[in-house]
Image: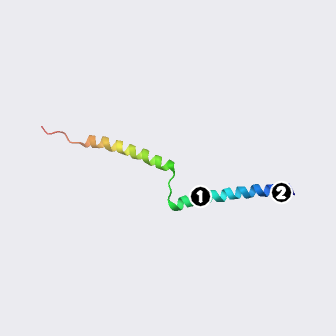
Amino acid sequence: MKLRGRDGGVVNKLGMRVLLFISILSFNLLTGAESPVSEKEKRISNVEYNRTLKYETTFLRSRPLS
């Protein structure tokens, strides 16, 4: 009888963890919260874009008239 009670406690803890995880995940999706990983990727792509833009403006500069 005691063994059955222990198993029920483990199932309840697991169920609570799953419920908590789903709640946090859905809250983040509904509020549009971004993870630090996606913000880091955005910064990296912004740096790459700025580097590309710098080279393009240098390339597109007109020659001096003489």
Horizontally, residue 8 falls left or right of residue 29, namely right
Within 10 angstroms of label 1, few (less than 14), some, or many (20 or more) residues? few
* Display colour scheme: rainbow
Horizontally, residue 34 falls left or right of residue 60, namely right
Q: Amino acid at mark 2?
A: Arg
**Which residue is tagged 2?**
4
- Which of the two residues, 9 or 43, is positioned nearer the viewer here? 9
Horizontally, residue 31 falls left or right of residue 53, namely right
Q: Amino acid at mark 1?
A: Ile
Q: Quadrant of residue 64?
A: top left
- The quadrant in which the N terminus is found is bottom right
Q: Earlier in the sequence, mark 1 or mark 2?
A: 2
Q: Is residue 18 above or below residue 47?
A: below
| Image spot of residue 18 (x, y percent) | 66, 57
Q: Is residue 7 above or below residue 56?
A: below
Label disc, if present, on residue 39 of the rendered structure:
none
Within 10 angstroms of label 2, few (less than 14), some, or many (20 or more) residues? few
Instruction: Say whether marks 1 and 2 touch (CB < 8 Å).
Output: no
Q: Is residue 4 above or below residue 59?
A: below
Q: Quadrant of residue 5?
A: bottom right
Label disc, if present, on residue 24 of the rendered structure:
1
Q: Which residue is located at x 37 percent, y 45 percent?
A: 49
- Which of the two residues, 9 or 44, is positioned nearer the viewer here? 9
Q: Which residue is located at x 25 percent, y 43 percent?
A: 60
Q: Which residue is located at x 62 percent, y 59 percent?
A: 22
